[in-house]
Image (cartoon, grey):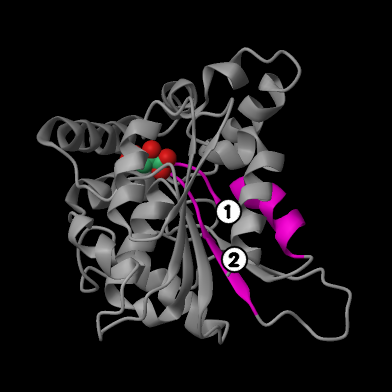
Amino acid sequence: MMLSFADSCSHSGQNKPSEAILFLNAFPLNQSMWDDQVAEFATTHRVVTFDWPGFGKSPTINDETSGRGMIPYAMAALRLLDHLSIDRAHICGLSMGGYGALALWSIAPQRIRSLILCDTRATSDNSDVRDGRLAMAAGVRRDGIASLADTMIPRLLGDSTISDSGSALKIVERIRKMISSCNPEGVARAQIAMAERSDSSDLLTSIGHDTGFNDAIRSLIIVGNEDKLTPPSEMTLLARAIPGSGFMIIEGAGHLPNIEKPLAFNRVMREFLESI
Ligand code: MLT
């Protein structure tokens, strides 16, 4: 399966950047959620974005043999790195993108140069959350995605963003457009995959330690202070569980700090990359 992707570099010097960043998108969005980060980091890095299978322009996964939960999604990201001949990349994943990043760490840690985990979690879901996901999967298969944006937007954005008369309309429209580009079957399969994903908590110490199977890498945890889905209290626990990880809170942002507060997000991400 070939994913829809973009491989960007706007560096003007003679020597092309040797370091690559791979961005993994949130549910139910697409790679354009990273537009502000592509503009910023393509000046210094090779920047790769792609649509998860079934989102944006990527086809849905139809290979039932490549595993359960987030593993087929991580495999798709891995195949993209292979296709682009990228040996190792900084991986930045937000929410579902973070689940995918941890799944990638579980199968191919040697391909990861550093990890930036935003507004996400390592734990799996309790039965209520799982039931909600299966209900949404059944709902979009039955009714399509017409009402998905109205359901998701208030959950995704922080109150400061929603009440900012200057920028709310533009951000809401941008998110609405991304959600409406999703394929209902892709949304359903992603919800089922997230419901089935395994708990990654036991992996977290290996990120900051040499284990023999993997080298220790640097990591950064980022969260919007108004995130209702993965609040800072939960992200603090994630940061504490990864030895040596950085922890940055983006003020005035909800679950999508890279969209809601792109300048602050880009600043902390750049400081982190420059510190490696
Ligand atoms: C996301 O933003 O990717 C979703 O909130 C992930 C989830 O439903 O757990």
Report whether 201 appears left or right of 222: left
> Which residue is outermost to the left?
127
- Find residue 4 and report its image quarter: bottom right
| Residue ranking furthest to the front | 244
Pick whichever of labels 1 and 2 is earlier in the sequence. Answer: 2
Which residue appears at 29% of the width and 33% of the height?
142
Could you say which is closer to the camera, residue 265 or residue 243?
243
How far apart marks 1 and 2 lie (CA) works out to: 8 Å
For mark 2, does the 10 Å Cα neighbourhood hold few (<14), some (14 to 19), or many (20 or more) residues?
Answer: some
Question: Which segment did they paint magenta?
Answer: 19-42
Residue type at numbered disc 1: Gln
Residue at x-position 39% and y-position 53%: 98
Q: Say whether residue 247 is left or right of residue 50.
A: left
Label 1 SS = helix
Q: Position of residue 153 (x, y in %)?
A: 49, 25
**x and y percentages locating residue 189 in the rendered image:** 30, 50
Quadrant where the image shows the N terminus: bottom left
Instruction: Look at label 2 and name its amino acid.
Output: Phe
Q: Which residue in the structure is indicated by mark 2?
A: 5
From the viewer's perspective, tell me whether residue 35 is left or right of residue 159: right
- Given contact means CB atoms under 8 Å apart, are the residues at marks 1 and 2 in contact? yes
Residue 190 makes an appearance in the image: no
Let me know if residue 38 is in the magenta part: yes
Q: In the image, is residue 83 above or below residue 243? A: below
Q: Which residue is mark 1?
A: 31
